[in-house]
Structures are given as C-alpha cells and as structure tokens.
Amino acid sequence: MQTSALVPYARLPRTYHDRHVLTSTVDAFGAAHWLLAERAPEPDGDRHPFDALVVSVRDDGGVEATELSALRARFPYLDRLPDGGFVVASARARRGDAHGSQVQVFDALGRETRSFTVGDAIEHLLADPSGALWVGHFDENPAGIRRWSATGDLQWDSGDVPGAGWIMDCYALNVSDSVVWACPYTDFPLLEIRPDRPVRVRANTVRGASAVAVHEGRVAFFGGYGDERDRVAYGELTDATVEPAGAAVLTRPDGTPLGRRRVVARAARIYVQDEPFTEWAVWDLSD
C-alpha cells in the first residue's frame, strides 16, 4: 500500500519542554494549543485543583501563554473560544457533583467565569467558530453527540437518528464552520450534521476510524482496527453512500510510522500529534 506523509504544522517552543503535557488541540481557526502543568496531576486530581499554563502557537508562528488557575480535570480536553478564552473539560463526570464543575470556562485573562456539566464519558470536545461546544461520548454514556453553548445550555441532541439508530459511541467527530461530520459505532455510517436540518446518513464500509475529513464530495477516514491503525481510506460521497476510492498508510513527516497519538479533525484537515506530544502535523484532503 502506498504511503502519505504528514506535513509539520506547529511546535511547542522548547522553553516549555520541561513541563508535563496534559493535553493539546488545534482550534477552529487553526491555532495549536498545549495545556501544561509543572507535573502530572495526582490520581485524584479532580478533587485537588492545580494551576496550568496554555501555550498557543498561531498559524503565523506567534506564541502566547495564558495561566489558568484551579483546574479540576485530571484527564482534560481543551479548546479555545472565539473570544480568546478557553474551555477545559474532564472526560469523566463525578457522580453527585453538586457544583457542576466538569467543564470550566476561562476568559482571555485565564479567569474562570463559569462551570457546568455535559455528561460522563467524553470522547471528543470541539468548539466551533461560533463558540458552541460539540461533545461526542464513548459507550459508557449513551448521550451520543450534543451541542452546548459556552454557558452550559443544551442546544442540540442527536437522539435516535433515522437510518442510523442511537449513537452508542462517537468514534470520529469533525467540527468546522458550517457542518459537523461524525462516524459512530457500530455500523460506522457517515453522519452529516447541521443543527437546523435532519441528520443526513450515508452508509459506509470503513470500520473503526478515529478521524474523518471531508472536502468537495470526497472523504477520508483515518485509523482503524489492528493493522489498519495508520490507514487513510478514501471515499466519494453519493446521496446515500460512501463509495470506496483507495487507501494509503499515513506516516510521520520523515516517513517513519506513527506512535501513540491524538487526532483532531477540522473540515478537510486531520491534525495528528504523537509522542512526546510536542509537535502537530497535518494531512489535508484538499491538497
């Protein structure tokens, strides 16, 4: 099978390499962000708040640093909001949490402005350009996919999708400016989500992808089970199906195999970061 190499995208400045990387992401506007702590949180870190630093690298190479105080998420998700603030969420919601503190929202100066809960078992949390938060859950929470405001109001719920059923596990989620794409377990249909319209469902034969990119009638699925972990499977969109159109193996920019990684999908792009999680690379379906 042919290979397709990632392209270097953003790098954490070396001055911060002595810190522990809690998580990292690429936002809806293309900036990369790292959430850093002096050390790894304690096992019960969600009960013992700690301070952290967000280092942001813009697509023009500019660097910003924002201090956040009293974080409570031990396994956090991070994204930037269009007003310059940040959202940090814990993947797990504690039972009996009377404070609704699973999701913390910070302003551009790093001050917490509100907190709320979106439900246990977060698999994906991505902010769209309007500042709405799209949350996809894994199989310990049957909530599927939901859209929340940055103040904690539920705005949209996938529910029981005609033609696809109930979403048990949101394997892949792509959030851009006008449309959200998802590929859920168990039959892995490609879902086209626009909150003001019924969800469009396309049958798909690719199984186990962890990211999906879409551009002008074409689609690419990244990841899979077993030996297909580094696979990129191409497809063409019809009204009701994804028609297979080839595959490749995705590699690091230098052509070597990927290690343990995190991925973020935005429109035609799939951003990939593997250990030691200090660099982002990108694969662009539109190229």
Image: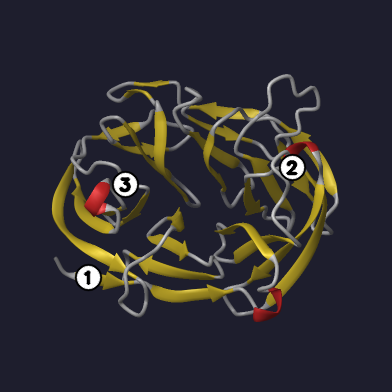
Q: Which residue is mark 3?
A: 209
Amino acid residing under circle 1: Thr
Q: Which residue is mark 2?
A: 45
Who's the residue at 50% across and 52% down the image? 177
Amino acid residing under circle 3: Ala
The quarter of the picture where residue 185 lies is: top left
Q: Quadrant of the N terminus?
A: bottom left
Q: Is residue 196 above or below residue 110?
A: above
Q: Nearer the viewer, residue 218 or 69?
A: 69
Q: Which mark is residue 143?
A: none
Q: Nearer the viewer, residue 88 or 85?
A: 88
Q: Position of residue 38 (x, y in %)?
A: 76, 62
Q: Which residue is mark 1?
A: 3
Q: Position of residue 26 (x, y in %)?
A: 55, 60
Q: Is residue 125 above or below residue 86?
A: above
Amino acid residing under circle 2: Gly
Q: Nearer the viewer, residue 111 or 99?
A: 99
Say which label, 2 or 3, has the lower sequence index.
Answer: 2
SS for dot 2: helix
Q: Position of residue 41 (x, y in %)?
A: 72, 50
| Pointer 1 local density, CA inside 10 Å: few below 14, some 14–19, many at least 20 | some
Q: CA distance from mark 1 to mark 3?
A: 17 Å
| Pointer 3 local density, CA inside 10 Å: few below 14, some 14–19, many at least 20 | many
